Image (spheres, rainbow, N blue to C red):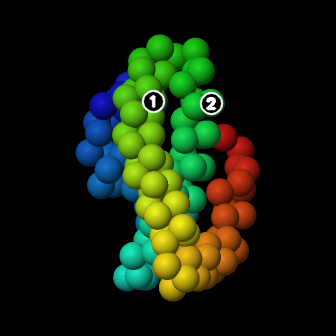
């Protein structure tokens, strides 16, 4: 609803959710990786949550009070996911040799995808 208001072209929230070109639906490749290993999932969540935390910390400084308020609300959820994944990274890293090796291998595999977190566009 807020995006439609900001756009000012008379669209509603359904327009943004359902009536976009396929190229307008974007996300990070990091988030698409189809792994079922728990350590891999935790490492991926940790990397994404860490990035999101710092991104939202900056966004909460927006001059638009309504937008900044929404960011504050989302930031609480991001902090929860960051804390949860951080605790698991530590448990797995400090656990058995196998859990340590598997979480390290997961980070090694995921690291090549982190550069996309820092791509800049015109926005």
Residue displayed at 37% across by 29% down: 73
Q: Residue 49 versus residue 65: which sits nearer the camera?
A: 49
Q: Please, is residue 81 above or below residue 35 in the view?
A: above
Q: Residue 38 versus residue 44: which sits nearer the camera?
A: 38
Residue contact between numbered discs 1 and 2, judged by CB atoms under 8 Å: no
Q: Which residue is mark 2?
A: 58
Q: Is residue 12 left or right of residue 80?
A: left
| Residue 118 in which image quadrant | bottom right
Residue displayed at 39% across by 76% down: 38
Q: Position of residue 91 (x, y in %)?
A: 46, 64
Residue displayed at 72% across by 64% down: 115
Q: Please, is residue 86 above or below residue 113 in the view?
A: above
- Quadrant containing the C terminus is top right
Q: Position of residue 117 (x, y in %)?
A: 65, 57
Residue displayed at 61% across by 76% down: 104
Q: Residue 113 versus residue 91: which sits nearer the camera?
A: 91
Q: Position of residue 49 (x, y in %)?
A: 51, 51
Secondary element type, mark 2: helix
Q: Is residue 59 left or right of residue 68?
A: right
| Mark sitting on residue 71 | 1
Number of other residues with Cα within 10 Å of mark 2, as a class: few under 14, some 14 to 19, many 20 or more: few
Number of other residues with Cα within 10 Å of mark 1, as a class: few under 14, some 14 to 19, many 20 or more: some
């Amino acid at each position: 609803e807020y995006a439609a208001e900001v756009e000012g072209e008379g669209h509603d929230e359904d327009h943004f959710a359902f009536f976009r070109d396929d190229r307008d639906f974007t996300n990070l490749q990091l988030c698409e990786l189809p792994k079922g290993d728990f350590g891999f999932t935790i490492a991926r969540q940790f990397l994404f949550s860490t990035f999101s935390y710092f991104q939202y910390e900056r966004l909460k400084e927006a001059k638009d009070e309504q937008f900044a308020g929404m960011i504050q609300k989302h930031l609480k959820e991001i902090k929860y996911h960051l804390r949860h994944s951080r605790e698991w990274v530590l448990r797995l890293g400090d656990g058995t040799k196998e859990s340590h090796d598997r979480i390290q291998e997961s980070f090694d595999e995921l690291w090549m995808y982190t550069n996309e977190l820092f791509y800049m566009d015109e926005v």
